[in-house]
Image: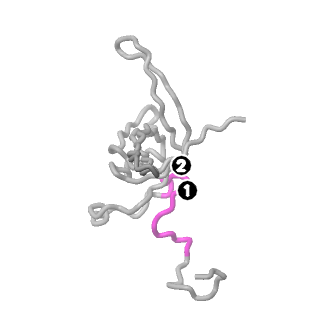
Amino acid sequence: MSVNKVILIGNVGKDPDVRYIENNVCVANFTLATTERGYTTQSGVQIPDKTEWHNIVAWRGLAEVAEKYVRKGTQLYIEGKIRTRSWEDQNKIRRYTTEIYVDNMELLGRRDSQSASASTPQAAPAQAQPAGYQTPSNPGFASTGGNSGDDDLPF
């Protein structure tokens, strides 16, 4: 058995580069930064933060969601798989790159104040939403405005 699964939570490093290729298939490329926080050892040695950059590739509906809603600085949850590809550059040197092909993407955090004042819809149309994406206002959740005692939750 083998598994090729990546889970990342990070911040987008640049606005997505979106292209439409043959048969009007949408593909989005962008970078995602993940950071391990630094710390101080017991002996007082400072270990700095370490940021890793990931090349992200989203296809079709997920690419369309990225085109509409993902911008530099957006915090994302990404599930996908690692793919390595190679090509020959203009000097006939073999080059390699490692990318994360997105299977699932969720927008995290809040919209910034500029986006909140714009007339942007709360969520992408249903057919363009990535699997597992939930909008901030979940119509399937009935709010009672407080604990009415109808459930068995302790709060």
The residue nearer to you, when weighing 137 against 64, is: 137
Residue type, numbered disc 1: Gly
Image: magenta residue range: 126-141
Whether the magenta-drawn stretch holds residue 94 is answered as no
Q: Which label was assigned to residue 154?
A: none
Quarter occupied by the C terminus: bottom right
| Residue lying at 38% horizontally and 17% vertically, measured from the top left | 89
Q: Which label was assigned to residue 132?
A: 1
On screen, residue 111 versus residue 22, left or right, reads left
Q: Name the secondary structure under disc 2.
A: strand
Q: Main secondary structure of the magenta part?
A: loop
Residue 57 x/y as whole percent = 46, 38
Q: Up-down: is 94 above or below 70?
A: above
Q: Outermost residue, right direction?
A: 1
Disc 2 vs disc 1: Cβ atoms closer than 8 Å? Answer: yes
| Residue lying at 66% horizontally and 82% vertically, measured from the top left | 152
Count neighbours of disc 2 (C-alpha within 10 A) and say few if under 14, some if 14 to 19, many if 20 or more: some
Count neighbours of disc 1 (C-alpha within 10 A) and say few if under 14, some if 14 to 19, many if 20 or more: few
Q: Which label was assigned to residue 104?
A: 2
Q: Up-down: is 144 above or below 107?
A: below
